[in-house]
Amino acid sequence: MENSMTLPLSPLYRRINSTRTLPRQNFYTLALNGEYAHRAFDEERAPLNKGKWRSEVFQAEEARVLDLEIGTGTGTFFAHQAIKNPERLLVGIELKYKPLIQSIRRALTAGANNAAACRFHAFNLDQLFATEELNDIYIHFPDPWVTPRKPQNRTVNAELLKIMHGLQRPGSRLYFKTDSREYFLWALEEIKRTPYEVAFMTLNLHQSEKSTENFVTGFERIFISQGIEINYLELIRK
């Protein structure tokens, strides 16, 4: 990540391997800087868009809404969100090459010209976006880090939430879904140490007033079939 290393690093910063120097390339690593390079960015090119996602990547006006999904997986929600909301711009981040390419390919194939994706670590968001560059943020079913028990690696932690709060524009929201009750309750305590306000919270999304507007992801279908309740939270950035 040579380009991002020239920027001040936050205490949460996580180094990841360079796509450019991988000893073995495959279809997905090559597609990142090849076929999909106009809308998919590796860990070196992505930080160059900081403060310029609207103007440079999407050729859009500064007033345009710019949302973020942290951890796109294979991109079912990512593509759905982009297609359903063509007036909003959407950036997705994902570390694994195959799901990253699947995500942007799924969106572009469906005709969404408002989507972009990049290979980046969630803890490095301040390397990727400028202050108040973002609107809404979506975090769906992140690794709960319960076995082994390493909560310091959880995405929804107080320090990263403070960073995300600063990257969002006033009035924006953060949406968090997880099947892990342990993670969810832990996150609620972390949120108390941040400037966010809780707009909505439930321990059982599919029995709540939000169920009808919820998009069910692939992971979510598996959890539902197993009788696992989905924990859901909406935070607002005042």
Image (cartoon, rainbow, N blue to C red):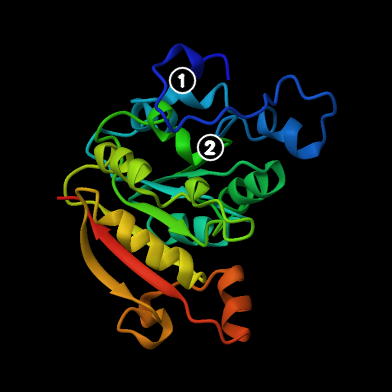
* Residue depicted at x 41% and y 66%: 184
Mark 1 vs mark 2: in front: 2
Residue 236 x, y percent position in the rendering: 22, 56
Q: In this view of the protein, which residue sits in the foreground, 77 or 188?
A: 188
Residue at position x 57%, y 48% from top? Answer: 108
User: What number of labels is visible?
Assistant: 2
Report the side of 136 relative to 114 (left or right): left
What residue is shown with label 1?
48
> What kind of residue is marked 1?
Leu
Whole-Å distance between the Cαs marked 1 and 2? 15 Å
User: Do callouts 1 and 2 mark residues in contact (Cβ within 8 Å)?
Assistant: no
Dot 2 crowding, Cα within 10 Å, few <14, some 14–19, many 20+: many
Q: Image quadrant of residue 32?
A: top right
Is residue 13 depicted above or below 204 in this figure?
above
Residue closest to the far left: 238
Where is residue 76? Give x, y as percent: 57, 61
Label placed on residue 80: none
Q: Residue furthest top?
A: 6
In-front residue for pair 125/60: 125
- The residue pinned by badge 2 equals 121
The foreground one among 128 and 116 is 128
Under tag 2, what secondary structure? loop
Mark 1 surroundings: few (<14), some (14-19) or many (≥20) residues within 10 A: some
Horizontal and vertical percent position of residue 29 = 74, 33
| Nearest to N terminus: mark 1 or mark 2 | 1
Relative placement, left or right, of 118 versus 164 is: right
Q: Which residue is nearer to you in this view: 235 or 99? A: 235
Rendered position, 21 above or below 176: above
Q: Is residue 138 left or right of residue 168?
A: right
Amino acid type, mark 2 = His
The quadrant where residue 28 appears? top right
Write the residue at 34% across / 84% down.
208
